[in-house]
Amino acid sequence: SNINKQNLRARNFMKKVKIGNKVDNFELESTNKDGFEFKDYKGKKLVIYFYPKDNTSGCTQESIDFSSKRNLFRKLNCEIFGVSRDSIKSHYNFKEKFKFKFDLLSDPNETLCKAFDVMKEKSMYGKKFIGVERSTFFINEKGVLIKEWRKVKVNGHVDEVLAFVKSLN
């Protein structure tokens, strides 16, 4: 399929995203059946948040918080997208279960995760592994990354992001 070719191309060519730089176009599978293509959102502000795993407590809470404030973000011409390495099927179930008001993007090849440098060494129960570090990125209407939040703690995070977006207006 076209999306898989795009994924391969993105994996090979997507350069690291840095603050102050334009984000390269990319495509990913999305819970919106048409998929997601970055260039379709020119002229809109975007919040893209990366989270470790569907249906885990922190990721669920963070997604619920973003969903509950979505209308406030939209009033500021800002769309929200959640990204994890989970399959699109897992994303559909997660979105459906909690009625999220925005789409989730599936990044099983870690294309976007690597471009945004969110793959970090983590440890659980004494075992070390590479996983997604909870992180949020804000991209302006021109497609430029202007703010990042790394090592995000869920409590109060969405309010902080919303306050930042409001401060731009």
Image: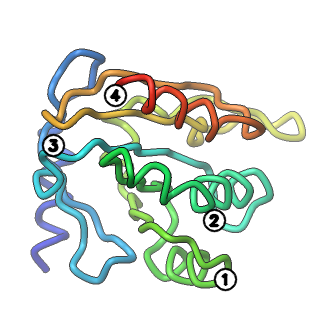
Q: Is residue 169 left or right of residue 89?
A: left
Query: In which image quadrant can residue 145 be found?
Result: top left
Residue depicted at 14% across the width and 45% down the height: 43
Residue 19, position as x, y percentages in the image: 30, 17
Residue to which mark 1 is pinned: 97
Q: Nearer the viewer, mark 1 or mark 4?
A: 4
The Cα–Cα distance between marks 1 and 3, rounded to whole angstroms, is 34 Å
The Cα–Cα distance between marks 3 and 4, rounded to whole angstroms, is 36 Å
Query: In which image quadrant can residue 18 be found?
Result: top left
Name the residue furthest right.
Answer: 125
Instruction: Identify the secondary structure beneath mark 4.
Output: loop
Q: Nearer the viewer, mark 3 or mark 4?
A: 4
Mark 3 and mark 4 lie on one chain; the one further toward the N terminus is 3
Mark 1 and mark 4 lie on one chain; the one further toward the N terminus is 1
Residue to which mark 2 is pinned: 54
Residue 108, position as x, y percentages in the image: 41, 61
Residue depicted at 60% across the width and 79% down the height: 99
Residue depicted at 60% across the width and 38% down the height: 134
Mark 1 and mark 3 lie on one chain; the one further toward the N terminus is 3
Q: Nearer the viewer, mark 3 or mark 2?
A: 2
Find residue 169 and name its label: 4
Check contact, mark 3 vs mark 4: CB within 8 A. Answer: no
Q: Is residue 27 left or right of residue 106?
A: left
Residue to which mark 3 is pinned: 12
Check contact, mark 4 vs mark 2: CB within 8 A. Answer: no
User: Mark 1 belongs to which amino acid?
Assistant: Lys
Residue depicted at 63% across the width and 65% down the height: 54
Q: Which is nearer the eye, 1 or 38?
A: 38
User: Mark 3 belongs to which amino acid?
Assistant: Asn
Crowd tier of the residue under label 1, counting other residues whose Cα lies within 10 Å: few below 14, some 14–19, many 20 or above: few
Name the residue furthest top.
Answer: 20
Instruction: Identify the secondary structure beneath mark 2.
Output: loop
